[in-house]
Image (tube, coloured by chain):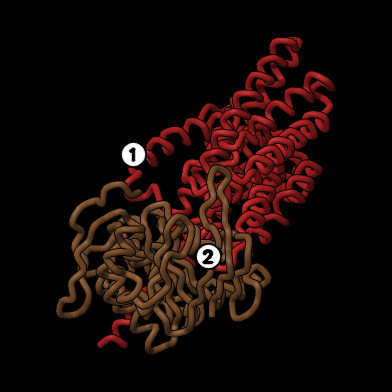
Chain colours: A brown, B red
Amino acid sequence: MLTARNIFYDYPERQVLRGVSLSLAPGEVLAVLGPNGAGKSTLLRCLAGALSPKGQVELDGRALESVPPAERARLLAFVPQHVPPRLPMTVFEAVLLGRRPYLSWRPRQQDLEAAWEALSLMGLGELAHREFSEISGGQRQKAALARALAQESRLLVMDEPTSSLDLKHQLQVMTVLCALAEERDTGVILAVHDLNLAARFAHRVILLHDGRVEADAPPSEALTEESIRRVYGVEVLRMEAGPGTMFFPMSAASGTA
Amino acid sequence: MEASEAKAGIEAYGALTGRRSARIAALGALLSLAALFSLVVGSSSTGIMDVLRVGLDGVIFWELRVPRVIMGLLVGSGLAVGGAVTQAVLRNPLASPFTLGVASGAGFGAALGIVLAGAIAKWAVAGGAFSFALITALFILGVARMKSATPETLVLAGVAIMFLFSAGTSLLQFLGTEQQIQSIVFWSFGNLSRASWTDILIAAGMILPALPALFLRAWDLNLLLAGDEMAASLGVRVERLRLTALLLAALMTAGAICFTGVIGFIGLVGPHVARLMVGGDHRFLLPASALSGALLVLVSDCLGRTLFAPHMVPIGIVTAFLGVPFFFGLLMRRKREFW
């Protein structure tokens, strides 16, 4: 259980988060949406403990900063937006790094198995022994996700985990995350740009606008033509299609940001 | 099907780590051979039979050859492990303690010692080198502490320091007497021939304790390669690790060069040779770097002693001639091996 109460975060030149509150329950998939600069990444980094905001962030009822880093790593996994393009190791070794919170020197059989399972969940089994630096950008992103899965934490905080992925792999990743939420009660919070992806997979959506929560509700309530116009400054056509809700951008609305 | 795939995948990893351990053992064996060879090779031709026959009584053997080889082992492992750690900490395959300006600092300190106390006052020379290496390292640590400091900032700070100390050393040469200039130039070549047992004790005291301290941080160094945020999210106290590792690397560098002078490229080439052999996992990379660095130093020193015998070429010159082409080779092969 991850809770943020009225958090504020300032960079030297500007205020980014202005009183954000949210909670993430086990088994829940929560999508954070909002235009560029709305504060999505900052919010996720605050939730993951990478930044220390004003206000309270609590992990299982304890102040996040009071949880020792090694223990936090067993409870919460974070996937930053940027994956380093080069690592002097194989894909499997890169994923095995996710077992660090459990390792002393030599990885035990269960560490190797957990890493392998995470790797194959992301469909990277065939690339396991390739050099990390040689695989494609999308594959590297999936390897970073696999590393977080190998961590076997109860919470996953992911900053745009699908940004470098093609359509098929976006679906694959979202399906895996939803399955983890359902089968293992993992709580997932992720930043996404794709409204359709959020509407289809998220249980709940947080719409951020200028560092404030504009909406915090199931996708069908949070993502309306009206709220999207207000937040993104874009006219969209919302349609109920076969598997769910679809959004078609029409034009940039006039007179808004 | 899936279970057997997992089994095969995990076994393949086991085989990989097995190969790495075997290569480290092979490096160790090679290093032992090189050390034995170094003991019997020299401009004064003490053959292996002579060594065995003269044995304990051989002054050349115990006061020249043995200290030289031990110093070579210490210097090589200290520089290479320091280099490997610096590369991880700065996430920069081209970094080494030299890139941070620590060597330039040491060079300036030595020159200052020579000018102030004279070349015979060995302690002043070594002490000067050591203090300025530490001052440089502390300055770099200060830069690293700044919130906005990226790995690039550190390398640039190192370059700036290098310019500063080069200018300082030139100024000292400009002001110094002819004899002092000669000593400064001699120190700047890097040379193992002056190693005494006292030097060795002090260098060992600076290098050997740092080795296990760094080995114990191998996993955290691995994580640092994956990015600060990633490492932090996996439980690493990133700033503390970076500062500790840099300080230990600086200590090893100072220990390695304060009695021998600047021996370049070992800190850069050693870790790369090791990485080619055992990959980037620091559990294997650090021991392999120690061994390959020591091997490079012993081989370079043997070459320096034998190529133009009876003249001895200082090791620093040999490592520069060997190191620069290697460095270019690394740049050219960048796509695969440049991590």
Question: Which one is in front, B133 or A195?
Answer: A195
Q: Quadrant of the N terminus of chain B?
A: bottom left
Rendered residue at 41%/54% (across/down) = A84
Which mark is in front, 1 or 2? Answer: 2
Picture coordinates of residue A140, whole percent (x, y): 34, 61
Asked if one can make out residue A133 in the rendered structure from this viewpoint, the answer is yes
Tag 2: Cα neighbours inside 10 Å, few (<14), some, or many (≥20)? some
Query: In this orientation, which residue lies closer to the viewer: A49 or A198?
Result: A198
Q: Relative to residue B305, is residue B51 drawn left or right?
A: right
Q: Amino acid at mark 2?
A: Val
Q: Which residue is mark 1?
A: B332
Q: Which residue is the site of mark 2? A: A20
Q: Is residue A186 above or below residue B231?
A: below
- Secondary structure beneath dot 1 equals helix
Say yes or no: labels 1 and 2 on the same chain: no
In which image quadrant can residue A194 be found?
A: bottom left
**Percent x, y for residue A66?**
68, 71
